[in-house]
Image (cartoon, rainbow, N blue to C red):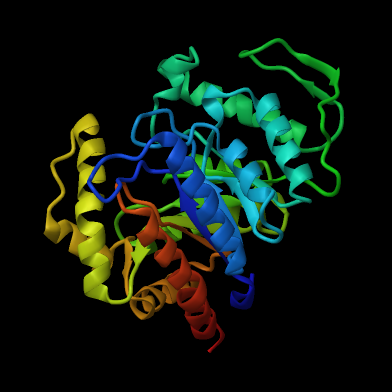
Amino acid sequence: MTTNNVEFGLDTFGDVTFDGTGTPLPHAQVLRNVVEEGVLADQLGIDFFGIGEHHREDFAVSSPETILAAIASRTSKIHLGSAVTVLSSDDPIRVFQRFSSLNAVSNGRAEVILGRGSFTESFPLFGFELSQYEQLFEEKLDLFAALLKNEPVNWQGSIRPPLRNQKVFPTIESGQLKTWIGVGGSPESVVRAAHYDLPLMLAIIGGSPYRFQPYVDLYHRAFEQLGKPVRPIGIHSPGYIAETDEQAREELWPCFKAMRDRIGRERGWPPMTRAEFDNEIEKGSLYVGSPETVAAKLAPVIKTLGIDRFQLKYSAGALGHDKMLRCIELYGQKVIPAVRAALAA
């Protein structure tokens, strides 16, 4: 990887936003807004647009590939993928078919990021036991990796009947479906990505990004031991860009806190304080501020960790659609060029 070839992307979970009166927008309107955000990202020359999968009231997207297909029909260059697809509670063959179909209609622009997901609502919804959390992901990933070869599949495991010389359609027209493994901080998951010869997407959503250097090093060592060239490494982190540092912080703070506290109540976390929020911006993995501030923070992270792609999770709870559009504009028009210039210096 050379720093001149770094890719820049955007991620959203389709967070349910509010209208001007503080009323939550219908899920349908949120989904239409996500399409508009993806179209704008393409117009700005941003490399990738990712949509996460959730099955809960505060996130509107339960079928990322459907929304990505709508964006594909109105764009021409941007790569489109999930962020992430919860493979553990899905059928690997159906996931492959949906993304190979997206790849076809987008002329080869589809990607999929496979993960276990940090939310577990999909398990009871689709009839899976949380006690099988690890086993489901491991076996389904093994099957998905077999599908990537784009040839008849022979596979056997404990979670479904075996496959014997089974063909899966549609096939990938050219090359291979780009597939990442999303990792939240497990060394085993890092090694697993290398084992399957797949790119690594690190979800760094809190604390110093530099604490993930050991995972980057582990990924490189794993490929060295396998005798293969290392695959790309990406980072997914939250952030928000406005005209000034103060504006960015003040606009994001109430929405970010409400989202963080809502999730925190489910997981036993204490309410987020303003000091925590500010510290995460200054020393952690929250990229918030003016374009100049965000670029100055991002460039050394990319250079030090040696990553190939950065994906900014720009949506945050009730943060308005108009504000997110402006954030996307500033990211594409100012942050990305500034980071590229800093990396080339």
Q: Residue 118's x, y, as percent? A: 39, 35
For this view, does 154 lie left or right of residue 341? right
Q: Residue 52's x, y, as percent? A: 49, 41
Name the one closer to the observer, 194 or 148.
Answer: 148
For this view, does 108 lie left or right of residue 66? right
Q: Is residue 251 visible?
A: yes
User: Which residue appears at 74% of the width and 38% of the height?
Assistant: 100
User: Which residue appears at 23% of the width and 47% of the height?
Assistant: 21
What residue occupies the far front of the structure in this picture? 21
Q: Is residue 279 visible?
A: no
User: Which residue appears at 62% of the width and 26% of the height?
Assistant: 140
What residue occupies the far bottom of the structure in this picture? 345
Q: Residue 156's x, y, as percent? A: 72, 17
Q: Residue 312's x, y, as percent? A: 45, 59
Rendered view: 83 above or below 131: below
Among the 4 quarters of the image, the one containing residue 299: bottom left
Among the 4 quarters of the image, the one containing residue 229: bottom right
User: Which residue appears at 26% of the width and 59% of the height?
Assistant: 252
How many marks the image carries: the answer is 0
Rendered view: 42 above or below 143: below
In the rendered image, which quarter contains the N terminus?
bottom right
